[in-house]
Amino acid sequence: MLTLTSPVETWAHRWPAGPKLALLALATTGLLLLSAPVLLAGAALATAGLYMTAGRGFARTGARLLWPLWPFVLVVGLWHLWTADLTGGAAILLRMLTAVALANFVTMTTRLSDMLAVFQGLARPLSPLLPPRRLALAFALVIRFIPVMLQRMAQIEASWRARSPRPPRWRVLVPGVLAALDDADRVAEALRARGGAG
Amino acid sequence: MERNLTHIALFAALIAVLGLIPKIDLAAGVPITAQSLGIMLCGTVLGAKRGALAVLLFLALVAAGLPLLSGGRGGIGVFAGPSVGFLIGFPVAAFVTGWLMERTSLSPMVAATAASVIGGIGVLYVFGIIGMSVMLDKTLGEAAFLSAAFLPGDAVKAVIAGLVTQSLSRMRPASLLSRA
């Protein structure tokens, strides 16, 4: 499965994940405290500059990751045109886009395994309730079973289409969920046979 | 123990799969993503605790950088965007849905639909609307107005959650862990 980590190696890939996340938390808090549109525009420009230091292709991918926000940009833009509060609207949109872009930058320059290692570290205080090995196993099971379940949903849909001229709709979900429950039972048995989930 | 773990993990995968399937035409001609349906099903099938844990596991993998939210979104960025309230509300919604499901003796269809409406829509929208009002600097009323666009789709999904839960309970009564 594809992750959002950029395959283009940049200088930021070599930074450890923990400090990157800490810096992100600081920067996001700072953004929430800023309210002057000029300062927020400065922050947005600095973030764009940060992306450019990683190269053009990287920056283009980063811009594409912001695309799902367009409905919000449209709605907030129209809203503030209507209320004639353009500086307020600009501040909201600049803050939103910069905060998301900064977070995306960290995601794009950090490998999935490194990020999961940070989460496991953060979960360490919970270890009496949630042993680290069990958490790691849970992550691995989800990642392994997503492609398996996608494929099976496609098979269920195909067998529906082979029998019915009508589109499948929600009915394909029942065998899908049932199969997931069966898989859960079988994987549990297999784990127990191999010494348990730790 | 192992069964709890595998059920939580497999339902986390199910939420992801429901968001990735491009266009299950759930009801006639309404192409809506089924991701929030996955949240509801976690509650109605797994019950409160396991359901909420499955959603948390799913969100952890999203935050870690897997593009598993509907529309292929993911990474920490989604937690900095205007829909963050809905994401925070997801595990709570699954918990409330499951909690209600565990505590009523109504038929699975009625219980699961009602629990999904209360947990998967009511509770979820409270979080989502508060999040949107903070992130976009709007009043709660204005944010509620903006979220109303998703309401018809989510109402359909609550009924589908009821239908799926009812079918599961008929085919295999023991599979409804929320009623175990």
Image (spheres, rainbow, N blue to C red):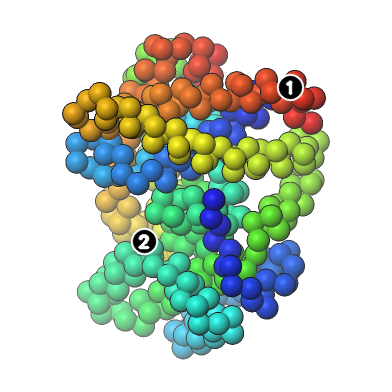
Residue name at image x 59 percent, y 49 percent: B61
Q: Position of residue B119 (x, y in %)?
A: 43, 34
Q: Position of residue B52 (x, y in %)?
A: 56, 35
* Image quadrant occupied by the C terminus of chain B: top right
Label 1 belongs to which residue?
A: A192
Asked if B104 appears above or below B26 in the picture, the reply is: above
Specify the amino acid type for callout 1: Arg
B172 vs B42, nearest the viewer: B172
Label 2 belongs to which residue?
A: B139
A16 vs B77, nearest the viewer: A16
SS class, disc 2: loop
Asked if A101 appears above or below A54 in the picture, the reply is: above
Q: Position of residue A29 (x, y in %)?
A: 60, 70
**Figure label count:** 2
Q: Would you say A169 lies left or right of A11 here?
A: left
Specify the amino acid type for callout 2: Thr
Q: CA distance from mark 1 to mark 2?
A: 52 Å
Count residues near mark 1 (Cα–Cα under 10 Å), then give few for <14, some for 14-19, many for 20+.
some
Q: Would you say B168 lies left or right of B11 here?
A: left
Asked if B113 appears above or below B81 in the picture, the reply is: above
Q: Position of residue A148 (x, y in %)?
A: 52, 36
* Image quadrant occupied by the N terminus of chain B: top right
Residue name at image x 77 percent, y 39 percent: A133
Residue name at image x 69 percent, y 55 percent: A113
Residue B155 visible at all: no
Give the quarter of the image for residue A30.
bottom right
Tag of residue A65: none
